Amino acid sequence: MTALAYLHGFASGPGSTKAEFFRARLAALGATLEIPDLAPDFTHQTVTGQLAVVDAILARGPAVLLGSSLGGHLATLAAARNPERVRGLVLFAPAFGFAARWEARVGPAAMARWRADGVLPVFHYGRGREEPLSIAFLEDARRHPDTPDPSCPALVFAGRHDDVVPLASVERFTSGHPERELVAFDAGHELVEVLEPMWELTAAFLHRLGAVAR
């Protein structure tokens, strides 16, 4: 039996719009989508810590990983280090090169304050409030590959108007890899305006993998 797990994005949570949408659609097919809380301690979260959550899921058996933004990056990292356990990936605007882009987005002045103070206030969309984030998050993120190279099939969605993850970075991941299919929409980073077409393609992909019943 192949498990299905959804990895939410940065400063998000298990109750995100995409997570709940895909859980409901899969439930209608008789499949369970596991949605772990990757960062219950937001302040002290790290990519390494989040990967430990994913590794615990994979330790139970083979799985298909769905991941949004940073969760998509985590899914590819997990697949690259557990090739025998991850049967496929469904990625929504995967945040490759996350650490470098995050540092550039914060800017030199705020980065200096972050290093001096040890924490930076960040808006948590899942909780609707600002929460402090330790500099250890960025330091740990730099220790992981910017663009992992998993061997399993991947269905990758991206938005042409994404102002967080450049389409070019996703194209680099799929280019030259026939087992990785890129579908680009006229949409932004969240991709919530194209949930239905993404579901149709995801369902077909999961059927091909034998992860859900027809």
Image (cartoon, rainbow, N blue to C red):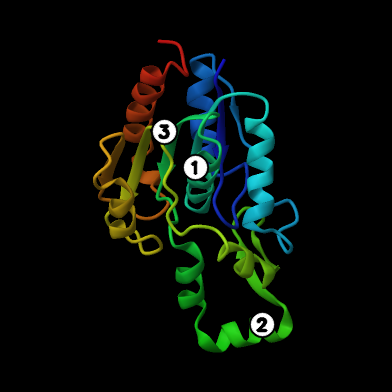
Camera-side mark, 3 or 2: 3
| Numbered tag placed on residue 115 in the rendering | 2
Please name the residue that numbered disc 1 is placed on.
80
Viewer-proximal residue among 129 and 111: 111
Q: Secondary structure at mark 1?
A: helix
Q: Quadrant of the N terminus?
A: top right
Amino acid carrying mark 2 in the image: Arg
Q: CA distance from mark 3 to mark 1?
A: 9 Å
Q: Which of labels 1 and 2 is toward the front?
A: 1
Q: Secondary structure at mark 3?
A: loop
Q: Is residue 140 visible?
A: yes
Q: Quadrant of residue 172?
A: bottom left
Structural crowding at the residue carrying mark 2, measured as other residues with C-alpha within 10 Å and reported as few (<14), some (14–19) or many (≥20): few
- Disc number for residue 152: 3
**Residue 37, visible in the rendered structure:** no
Instruction: Report which quarter residue 178 is drawn in.
Output: top left
To which quarter of the image does residue 214 belong?
A: top left
Residue 97 % position (x, y): 44, 62
Above or below, 97 against 6 in this view is: below
Residues at circles 3 and 1 in contact by the CB criterion of under 8 Å: no
Q: Which mark is residue 132?
A: none
